[in-house]
Amino acid sequence: MRQKYVAGFLTLMMMAVFVLSACGSESSKGEEKAVENAGAAKKNQVVNVFTARHYDIDFALFDEFEKQTGIVVNEIKGTAEELVERMKREGESSEADLFITVDGGVLNYAKENGVLQPIKSDVINGNVPAKFRDKDNNWVGVATRARIIAYAKDRVKPEQLSTYEALTEEQWKGKVLVRTSGNLYNQSLVASMIALNGEAQTEQWAKGIAGNLARDPEGGDRDQAKAVVAGLGDLAIMNTYYVGQMLNSKDAEEVKVAQNIGIFFPNQSTTGTHLNISGIGLAAHAKNKENAIKLIEYMTGKEAQEKLINSSFEFPVNEKAEVPALHKEWGEFKTQELDYAKLNEFNKKATELMNKADWK
């Protein structure tokens, strides 16, 4: 009897151990599955940004967005053309969720190449006026930049200035400074003039500019401003935001240069000052579409817009954003009324006209 009891007891104990072991195994599997699911969810909280804008403030905003949402922003940098070609080549396997660049014509180029898709968001539509959005909502603006006339305060009076066209007058012979014809900002300016004034008139204007240059085009917009202050020329065609950045530079020379040039917004009584755009497009095969739209909503929101323009000194697209004191000093100005698609449509012709005019 004692032996049977012991044997029975041992049998019960072995069964209990088996049951507990099985339960423990199932519990362990459950925990592993939970960890696996959590990892998968975390892995999906990303947005891959193909960007041709290489500004520190953009990356700072990406970091802030990540802190607020937990969505990790991965940046893939390159030129706009390189990124568009990569998106085309990779097709449905592309990792791109967003495409960012600095020119309205390039945004339209991306759209025409089939690498973008419509953005659907009432938040974005509320943040950004229709004039700064693609008509098919393939891209939306995040900032704008005006191409103006900078002048030497000690040699030029603002009342002497009027339009882009007037820069071809005899009084400015040997006094105009500008970047090369290969510069996208100049190509888009000329493309806008083709759209507004026609090819023949724009060709004559390009010849007039080339004939009034103080030197062969070289360097960037900052270099044109420096050349004005150095006395190499009296006027420079450049973007406003460079002046803002120079005024707030850690380089004392740049600050001094910016303090000695004035800003003039041309064509206020005619077609308006040329305004280009930085924008974001939603990638055609975005795998993180929801996260991508959230990032656009954030970038076009009032808070992010104010941080952006207080660093880059561009102009905001969100009308609720408070502009810096410098922008208020510049005042409001009339801008060109132009479909940004025209900048891409007339880019090739603009380059041809400049080359024909000997705008080097």
Image: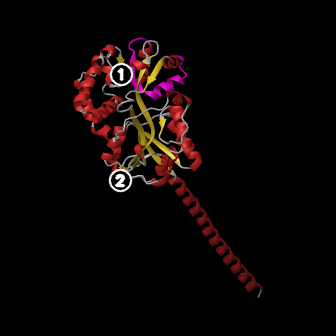
Residue at horizontal 41%, vertical 37%? 277
User: Residue 303 location, x and y as percent?
Assistant: 56, 42
Q: Quadrant for residue 175, please give it.
A: top left
Residue 172 to residue 238: above or below:
above
Residue in the picture at 71% in, 83% down: 8
Q: Mark 1 or mark 2, which is nearer the start of the sequence?
A: 2
Tag of residue 285: none
In the rendering, which numbered label is found on residue 92?
A: 2
Q: Residue at x 53, y 45 (%)?
A: 301
Position of 73 with respect to 197 (left or right) is right
Name the residue type under label 1: Val
| Tag 2: amino acid | Glu
The residues colored magenta run 230-252
Determine if residue 240 is in view: yes
State which quarter of the image contains the C terminus.
top left
As drawn, the residue found furthest toward the right would be: 2
Q: Nearer the viewer, mark 2 or mark 1?
A: 1
Q: Are marks 2 and 1 in contact (CB under 8 Å)?
A: no
**Secondary structure category for the residue under label 2:** helix
